[in-house]
Amino acid sequence: MQAGSYRGIGVRGYRPNCSREEKEMRAVTATEGLARNAVVLRISIGLIAKAARDLRRTQERSGLSVADIVNRALTLYEFVDSCRAAGDQILVRRNGASRLELVRFT
């Protein structure tokens, strides 16, 4: 399998099953740089306490803006959800560990 990229996340062997329109959008974005950082949707949401704490911790650790964190979180969620829908497993290797752990979602 070839190494690929799924909306900014390096993924080995990922081959998206997307529509022709989505492929064309990606081609335009990749070749011309259009819409890469353009705001196409603004939202206002309420966060539960745990999510607000997690967001603050992520901001402190990463130095990223709220918008960047939310954009990355949504992109990561889409990737994970599409893997789960395809029946794939998500595995994690902790720093320094030799064994893989299966990530379970409920």
Image (cartoon, helix red, strand yellow):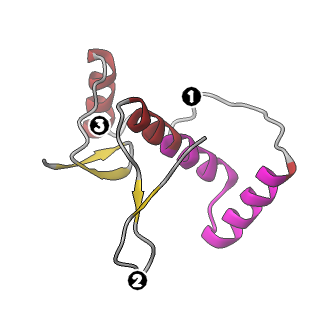
Q: Answer above or below: position of 48 versus 29.
A: below
Mark 3 / mark 1, whichever is N-terminal: 3
Q: Residues within 10 Å of mark 3 (few under 14, many from 20)?
A: few
Q: Which amino acid type is marked by label 3?
A: Glu
19 in the magenta segment = no
Instruction: Pick the residue in front: 29 or 10.
Output: 10
* Residue at figure coordinates x 38%, y 42% from the top left: 7
Question: Would residue 103 be found to the left or right of residue 28 on screen?
Answer: right
The label number, if any, that marks residue 40 in the structure image: 1
The label number, if any, that marks residue 96 in the structure image: 2
* Residue at figure coordinates x 73%, y 66% from the top left: 57
* Residue at figure coordinates x 81%, y 53% from the top left: 50
What segment is highlighted magenta in the picture? 50-76
Outermost residue toward the top in this view: 20
Query: Percent from the top left, x then y, of residue 56?
Result: 76, 62
Query: Percent from the top left, x then y, of residue 4?
Result: 23, 47
Give the distance between the C-alpha atoms of the residues marked 1 and 2, in whole angstroms.
Answer: 41 Å
Callout in the foreground (2, 3): 2
Instruction: Pick the residue in front: 27 or 49.
Output: 49
Callout in the foreground (1, 2): 2
State the residue position of label 3: 32
User: Which quarter shows the C terminus?
Assistant: top right
